[in-house]
Image (spheres, grey):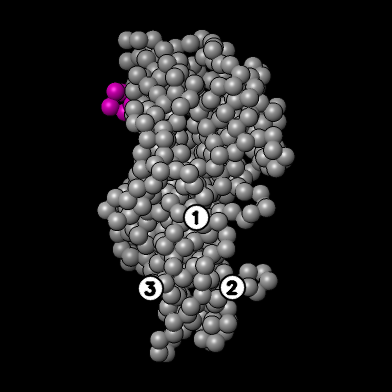
């Protein structure tokens, strides 16, 4: 069975390590916050100027002056802090944030990512994505392996305008966990019940399969 | 003490003209200078360039200036929640310069701090870097981005004093501090204006030297764009 969006988030949460500061993008990445492994401490950074972001506020306590990068009302946890946009991107550009999780329309085997623009369609903008992918050393992409027409989004080369070059380190899709290195995708794990053949068929980029590929443990 | 207080939003916006470039603080609708925006609509200044992370929604924030067709060019990182914006952009009435969010913040801060330009890795290898100077430092490629130049910066703070010192609240801070002193004239509007000497100097976020005019906003709607809550048990 291919993973649901929640399960993709659950699998990515296993990548979190103790004492990490983490920036989560909009969509599936946001769900990662629901599955923090027990016994570790992480803090979530929201690029609009919040560190130590907490859950959505209890109904009736929402504050117009406290939102996340998706413009949703949020809370701040004990020990959290608030700062201006320039300081926020100093944290990102200065590599003080250990992990960035974001969505993508396409990922290429050289680590390129495209997630902000479809030519001919309304362009909403890149927000903070270009700063995040250009700076972070550890970038995990959360995405569906194929598009609605069944075409692979895991490619030899991106066809859409790029958000960043050579930056993606890992991809977690509804079918597989892939590592991006040496200009290839390396298959690390399969979704439960999904075969290597099915993953190969859904992957346009070069896929390296070394030995037995374990099923994801989620 | 140098007094920066002005009596009204009308006085605060004196000198605003057609064709000028404005910086406006805020992230989404959070921390936007609501009173300055209303006055810009009233003044009906036209052909203006607005530097602001977002472009408001159809009937609030910068969306009000868009409805009135006052904006010639927007410089933003994300402009998603506005149908009139989309219409004007697709019809070619509105020029749009999309800028990575961290670069946008730093182009403000550079103007504030007196740097003509800076190198950033954001956008390298993408269309954002087309035609721009690039350079390698320690094996990584960077793009040269110039500081912004603007005539007015309109910012919103929580509290301020008559010396122009500002304190922000919550994530309404965002781009506001970076825009202070980044334009020829910085106009700060605050929810509460107090006499100089009332605020603790240790708690000031932006010193008054970066602010030319300050006034207490008449009212703040503080609209919430995405009300998300955890239901009561």
Identity of the residue furthest to the bottom in this view: A212
**Where does label 3 land, which residue?**
A182
Tell me where residue B227 appears, x and y as whole percent: 59, 46
Mark 2 vs mark 3: give the one in front.
3
Q: Which mark sits nearer the N-terminus, 1 or 2? A: 2
Determine if marks 1 and 2 fall on one subunit.
Answer: yes
Residue at position x 53%, y 25% in the image: B21
Q: Which of marks 2 and 3 is nearer the N terminus?
A: 2
Against A100, residue A122 (above or below) is above
Mark 1 lies on a secondary structure that is loop
Tell me the chief SS of the magenta region: helix
Residue that badge 1 annotates: A163
Location of residue A1 by image quarter: bottom right
Cα distance between the residues tagged 1 and 2: 18 Å
Circles 1, 3 touching at the beta carbon (< 8 Å): no
Which numbered disc covers residue B99?
none
Task: Name the residue nearer the viewer: A159 or B43.
Answer: A159
Give the label, 1 or 3, closer to the camera: 3
**Residue B48 image point, x, y percent:** 60, 25
Q: Quadrant of the N terminus of chain B?
A: top left
* Residue at 35% over, 48% down: B135
Density class for disc 3 (Cα within 10 Å; few <14, some 14-19, many ≥20) is few
Image coordinates for residue A12, horizontal then vertical, percent? 44, 68
Q: Are marks 1 and 2 in contact (CB under 8 Å)?
A: no
Residue at 36% x, 19% y is B208
* Numbered tag placed on residue A152 in the rendering: 2
Is B215 drawn above or below residue A17 in the view shown? Answer: above
Give the residues drawn in magenta, as a range: B200-204
Q: In this view, does A76 lie above or below A102?
A: above
């Amino acid at each position: 069975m291919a993973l649901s969006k929640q399960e993709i988030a659950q699998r990515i949460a296993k990548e979190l390590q103790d004492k990490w500061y983490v920036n989560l993008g909009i969509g599936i990445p946001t769900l990662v916050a629901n599955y923090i492994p027990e016994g570790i401490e992480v803090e979530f950074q929201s690029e609009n100027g919040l560190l130590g972001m907490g859950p959505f506020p209890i109904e009736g306590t929402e504050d117009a002056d406290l939102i996340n990068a998706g413009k949703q009302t949020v809370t701040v946890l004990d020990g959290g802090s608030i700062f201006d946009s320039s300081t926020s991107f100093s944290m990102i550009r200065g590599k003080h944030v250990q992990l960035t999780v974001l969505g993508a329309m396409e990922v290429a085997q050289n680590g390129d990512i495209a997630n902000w623009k479809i030519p001919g369609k309304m362009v909403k903008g890149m927000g903070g994505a270009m700063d995040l992918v250009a700076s972070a050393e550890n970038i995990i992409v959360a995405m569906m392996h194929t598009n609605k027409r069944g075409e692979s989004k895991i490619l030899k080369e991106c066809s859409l305008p790029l958000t960043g070059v050579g930056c993606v380190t890992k991809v977690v899709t509804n079918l597989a966990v892939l590592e991006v290195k040496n200009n290839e995708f390396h298959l690390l794990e399969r979704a439960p019940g999904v075969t290597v053949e099915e993953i190969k068929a859904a992957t346009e980029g070069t896929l390296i399969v070394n030995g037995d590929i374990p099923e994801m443990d989620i | 003490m140098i007094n920066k207080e002005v009596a009204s939003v009308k006085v605060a916006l004196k000198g605003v003209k057609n064709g000028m470039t404005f910086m406006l603080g805020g992230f989404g609708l959070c921390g936007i200078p609501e009173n300055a925006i209303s006055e810009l609509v009233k003044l009906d200044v036209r052909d203006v360039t607005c530097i602001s992370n977002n472009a408001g929604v159809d009937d609030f924030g910068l969306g009000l200036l868009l409805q009135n067709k006052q904006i010639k060019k927007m410089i933003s990182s994300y402009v998603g929640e506005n149908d009139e914006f989309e219409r004007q952009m697709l019809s070619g009435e509105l020029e749009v310069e999309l800028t990575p969010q961290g670069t946008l913040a730093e182009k403000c801060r550079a103007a504030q701090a007196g740097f003509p330009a800076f190198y950033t890795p954001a956008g390298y290898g993408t269309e954002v870097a087309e035609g721009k100077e690039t350079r390698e430092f320690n094996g990584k490629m960077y793009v040269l981005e110039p500081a912004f130049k603007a005539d007015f910066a309109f910012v919103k703070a929580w509290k301020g004093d008559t010396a122009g010192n500002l304190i922000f609240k919550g994530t309404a801070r965002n781009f506001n501090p970076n825009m202070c002193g980044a334009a020829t004239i910085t106009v700060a509007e605050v929810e509460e204006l107090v006499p100089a000497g009332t605020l603790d100097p240790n708690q000031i976020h932006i010193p008054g030297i970066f602010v030319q005019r300050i006034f207490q906003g008449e009212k703040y709607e503080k609209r919430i764009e995405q009300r998300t809550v955890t239901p009561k048990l």
